[in-house]
Amino acid sequence: MPTVLLLDVSLSMVRPVQISENVEISRKYLAIQGINAFLDCLSVHSRLEFIALAAFSSLYEERCAFTRDYNAIKLELQKLEDHDKTAIESALHGVNQLVLGEWGNNSACQIVLITDGNAGIGPMSLSESFSTLNHRNVSNPFPLPFSFPAKLHVVCIAPPDDPNLMKSKPLYQRLVDMAGYNGSLLIPEGGLSEASVVTMFQKLAEEMYTSFRGTLKCGNLESRIMLSPAPIPYIKVTDFDSQTYVLSELIEVCGFIPISDVGSPMAISRHLILPTNNLGKENVPLSMEIDLTSDDDTTEDGKNPSFCVLLHGALKVENMSALVTVGDNWFGFIYSWADSKKKSNLMLTVLTPGSDAIPWLGDLCHLDSTDNLPPDQIGSFPVRPSEKRSYSQNGVVWIRQSGLQSDIQKILRHARKLPEKTQQFYKELNRLRKAAISLGFLDLLNGLAYIFEQECTQLPGSAHPDCALQLTHAAEVLRKTQNKDIKFVILPLHTNYNSS
Amino acid sequence: MAFISNSKIFPANHKTIFVLDHTPYFGISCESPIEFEFLKSRAPGFIPFNPISKSLWTCSVESAIEYCRIVWDLFPQGKLIRFFASDTVAHIMNTWSPSQQNLNHVMNGMSLMGVPPPIRQTQQSKDYSVVHGLRAAIEALGECTDLQFEKRKADVNAKLINKCRIICITSARDNDSMKRLQEIFNNCLHAHNKAALNSDTYLPIDHCHLVIIHTFPVNIESQVTQQPARNISSLLTTEVYPIKAPQISNKLSSLILQHYELASTTVTGIPMKEEQNASSSANYDVEIFHSKEAHTAILKGNTADSLAIRTVKEGLEYETVTLKWCTPRGCASSELQNCTSMYRITPVEVNSRPSLCLINFLLNGRSVMLEMPRKAGGKITSHLLASHGGEIFIHTLCTARSVLEDPPSISEGCGGRVTDYRITDFGLLIQQNRLLPIKSNYVGGLPSSIPKVKARLGRHTKYWPLTISSTLIFNLKNYIDPLPSIITKEKITDEEMVQCKQVIYNLIALESKHEPLHLANMGQRSKGQKREEQYKIMWNELETLLKNNCHSETHKMVYNCLIECHKFNSDESDKVELDQALRELDQMAKSDSDVRASVIRATTDSPMSPPPLASIASPMARNNQNRAGGIYATKRSLYDIFMAQDKSKTRLDFAGRTGDNVAKLYPNLKIENDRGPREMETE
């Protein structure tokens, strides 16, 4: 999960802290020490995480773009100057833009706001921001919640009993809550010192980068796995409901569906599935619970067969995907995914919670294998909705004049080709008539009758005699007021020419 | 959750009512004649006829219907709209029931009601007013919809905020009468809520959004002025728009975007054959509506880029995002795109030729990529239009950097260096466990089939070695097929049982003829294999397979057949208890640290660990050290240890082979019937 370090560089950060009798250091120095410790933790445990550094006062400045080169950030920290005052709102706007520009609105990110427990004063202060919260409109929205899934951690470089901090604490907490996803508010334990700050940052790093470990199961075959990036809880909001879903540790295969049938459904997140062997239990059958973990070191991971690798190979060859359950009434797909390079991987796409996540696959709870069902109950993909949408219904829309004009022209085109087009002529005529009656557009019927009569007088000599007969007949029926019933259907006139 | 507002969970657009003025005034012409240019050019003798104009009624009905068309195309469920017409009474066209939430139902209702009554029959005594409709609408808004009823039933005390919207198309004399109308409405609303307090059937209305469209013919000046949204009371927000009758639809188009949080995309540069000149093609634009969310990614990204694609169309009030048609290459559906969102779309002009052209292109199964130009140069594929089952969706593609940048390949991780996975066999298992939908008319009341399909996969993998080198029988397909595919079925027929037994008989016959078993997958490499050993392993593995697949009595009969036909080592000493094996293992481990490592391997294949191929692999490995799959080649497995122990005990040769005696076959038939020869279970 990419992380933004958002460091307060206002003047209040340079306030000195008395460490011992003759030693004074600034809060900014402590913050930098803390961040260094944080980065050191990452370089040991999570080297692939992207980190960005931004500094703010009343201005916001991006200092380091997202990078895996943590030393670059450490160097940048040394170059920070001191500026005026703390303005958190504009800084959060900046972060919003920074993340959206880089990762879009779908990747979860973490934001670590490092400040001194002073939420600013006057305009642009946090309390000012909150007091105007109800008067926001589209042009100046409050930056929280972020436009992407985000955890906000507010880290205060302040002693726990700092009077400013006491005042700001509820404001910070409100920020964390507004961001959602269980962020946190951190204050160094046991007073302000280099050690307490470093410990706090180390703890934060540990907490932020807990990896997801679980089991991928397919019948009796299974594999311990890790998901990268680690999934975060998903909040699904529907009309009259809002629920939080947490990914289960057991990901279980239900069956298989061709990739081409799956289409490209909306994914709330995508994760690499990495087989792990850390517990030494890779593929150990459940019935034989022998604890052999101590000998783990003697085995070479790569040479130990893993179900994940088998699954990946077979899915790739068959061009199939595996439908899995990732929670209660929550599904995902596992398939072989290749980066632009040749490296191929096992990928988990997590769908929106609910068995109705993909309309064209129908209810995912009602998928079954063919031999579990009588043949007449087996459907096929894609599942069609019971009702057609307007664009496949040949409906009537006359809002723009061209719609009505082309409908009339179509009827006249058929009229000129009577009697061959008798069926089409009356079909179109009845369609137009029905619509006119529904819309209360009765003038149109009289107008059309008039057009038909005119058309009769204009017929070329080569025209079929049936043409004039049908047009006259149609005009007559259109004029009759008793035929304003929607169920009435204009039928062709029986003539010598079409009675056969 | 604090950061999700009530307006999202309890949206006003769940319930909408159109109240259409059906008073005699609405029968008048909107004075905007339809042009029939195409008739004029026909012939000189054509006598022009009186111009035809829609009535105010026709204009309001068709605009309201168009609003519904868009809503129901985009939200097939859950966004309910009702139609009320008002003259001397309220006419109700449909209910909240989903079966009446469709255009056909509403259109039929409209035609039954007919045009507004003619003006000349109007008598002063007759009380024509839109208020009847508004009153009835308030009552209807107090009715529970199916969804609200469910929520109420699920939890009586749950907070259920009943928000709703009324769109009233009427005509008022002046601002004063418009104001009175709003006041009357406000009073009715409060009266309803008072009554609803003591009612079980009616819900109070927590908030109502009243949109009044004041309409009039094009040749008249409006005496009513526009009134932006304002709160009349805590329950009511109203807004008033004076709109010329032919323009109602345009106004509703911009309102619908706010009401349902929609956005407009204009697909530009669609190549289309000219109607007149089929050999050339011109480029057309088609405008579509869809959820606003589909644009979030591109609009919130780079500000300069997003400004460049946003425009306001002439004569309209809303912005549209212009994206370029990208002629599809190949079939985009053959791979899973990284889609961050997908929403249904509907064309704004459903019957225009360019719209139809795009729609049919998509409905025929092809998909279209949409491109967004970038200020910095180049362009980016941002969306995908595709139809699925007759519905068209816009998919937002991930345009941002991926956090999965430069991931390690699966071959670099656990199990990545094993090269003899049974890929083909697992492919077969995948095909056998393909999922298909149950036809919708059979679904009603069915329990979820997920546990059933999971159980099925469980049955198919009772005994499933992962690699070729850890199994023998699955490499002997020409001998044992179709037994493996039959034995994993839930039920097997008598005929299939006979087929399975035949496989066993054939193997017995082969063994007695001293025929070596030819491994299908391994070709010549099995040459070094000793025949007797091969058979022994084969029998033991077959026994494991069958024992693990005793799903029914018929399955058991196959298993019993094997036990009856083949003599397993039945001596007392052969029944090695697992704990004993482990004890001995421990002793051995002291002298040979490799052994325990191999024990892990021996137990890493699948449940009911198979007897590995070690004893046949060893000679192979000796012949060919390069064989990558031979992971058991040099190390000893649990099975080796069992076997080693086995050999230490002297065992009698088959009586028939020792001398000229006639041996009694299956001497231990009875006692073997109900237990396996190798009791390996730990329980």
Image (cartoon, grey):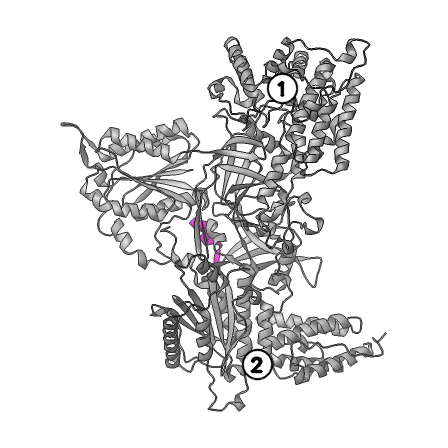
Give residue A186's position: percent from left, percent from top: 29, 38
Of the 4 image quadrants, the one containing the C terminus of chain A is bottom right
- Say if B11 sits above or below A418 in the image: above
* Kind of residue indicated by mark 2: Val
Pointer 1 chain: B
Report the number of discs.
Answer: 2
Is B437 one of the magenta-colored residues?
A: no
**Residue A256, numbered circle:** none
Residue B327 visible in the current orientation: yes
* Residue at 69% from the left image edge and 33% from the top image edge: B555
- Say if A290 sits above or below A439 in the image: above
Residue B643 placement: quadrant: top right
> What residue span does the magenta drawing correspond to?
B299-311
Residue assigned mark 1? B628
Label the magenta part by its dominant secondary structure: helix
Is B305 one of the magenta-colored residues?
A: yes
Going by the picture, which residue comes out furthest to the left? A21
Of residues B574 and B190, the one drawn nearer to the viewer in this rendering: B574
Residue assigned mark 2? B115
Of residues B48 and B13, the one drawn nearer to the viewer in this rendering: B13
Whether the residues at callouts 1 and 2 have beta carbons within 8 Å, the answer is no
* Kind of residue indicated by mark 1: Ala
Give residue B501's position: percent from left, percent from top: 76, 29
* Residue at 55% from the left image edge and 34% from the top image edge: A217
Element type where label 1 sits in the image: loop
Instruction: Compare marks 1 and 2 and give the one earlier in the sequence.
Output: 2
- Say if B31 sits above or below B17 in the image: below
